[in-house]
Image (cartoon, rainbow, N blue to C red):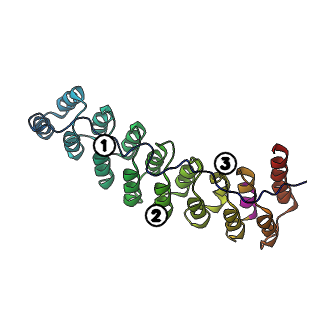
Amino acid sequence: KMAVVSGIVLPDVVSTLPNPFGHGHSNPVSYLRGRDSAYIAQINTGVPKDVLTSLLSDSPLSDEVLGAMINSGRFTSAEKTQLLATQTGLSNEIWRYTLTNFGILNASDMTSLAYMQPYFSDEILTEAINQMMDKWDQKFIEALFLRNEYLSTPVLETLMATENYISSGSIITILSAQPQMKESVLSSIISIKAVPKGSLGKVFRFQMMSDNLFDQLIENASIDNLTVVEVIENGLSYPNESSFLKLFDRNVQFSESDMGRICAVANRQLESS
């Protein structure tokens, strides 16, 4: 016996618009000319070790002071990171500056700061996608896009549309960590070259797929039979009768073993219903 489910409607995606986590961390310390001018003068002329000790003691600091520290050539990346990590989180302004001037801090320090950030706004994640270059460390990219519990649909759509540098391993890691994604995003994942076709089974794990998505998957000649089987096995839905019949129209016939795996999924759905 075999169950063929039809008329799949994707559930409401968890990824919402706008970013459910917020518009970015706000620095609670405002700029005060007298106080902060003195701090910046220390950064520019003081003994670095003594300056760092003083600033750590007086933290949190305004963005103007933090910016002066980041931009200074008198302190090491580790010293700058030590001060930044003492703050309660970094504002969009500070993150935008460090992304635009990638390399002003060591990649490992950037990664550490990303994991310390309470969350990232869509503005900063989109900025990162636009600024991404081949010199960016992939561990930092993963830390940046995995810091939030999930990515919003606009960020995922921008990520799918980018031609900037991101390794196939990183894109798979990021996409595989997402809860239910919007149909347009899933459709892009199936079609774009940036996502290795052999990894779709991992990306679509626990994803609901519509009939249209199953058709797109099955009709894509660049996706091999094993990957189709893995997507059906790992997902939360099953192709309807029309899509199921298209399995037999593929250029390369499914093996008896592969068809057995596909049918086993249908039988499990029938037994659980």
Q: What stretch of residues is rendered in magenta?
A: 225-230
Membership of 62 in magenta stretch: no
Query: Please, what secondary structure does the residue beneath circle 3 have?
Result: loop
Q: Residue furthest left?
A: 34
> Mark 3: which amino acid?
Phe
Where is mark 2, residue-wise? 162
Q: Earlier in the sequence, mark 3 or mark 1?
A: 1
Q: Verify CB contact (< 8 Å) between mark 1 and mark 2.
A: no
> Mark 2: which amino acid?
Thr
**Image location (x, y in percent) of residue 265:** 80, 51
Separation of disc 3 and disc 2 at Cα?
Answer: 25 Å
For the point 81% across and 43% down, the residue is: 272
Separation of disc 3 and disc 1 at Cα?
Answer: 34 Å
Query: Please, what secondary structure does the residue beneath circle 2 have?
Result: loop
Membership of 228 in magenta stretch: yes
Q: Earlier in the sequence, mark 1 or mark 2?
A: 1
Q: Which mark is residue 206?
A: 3
The image shows residue 136, relative to residue 187, as above or below, that is: above
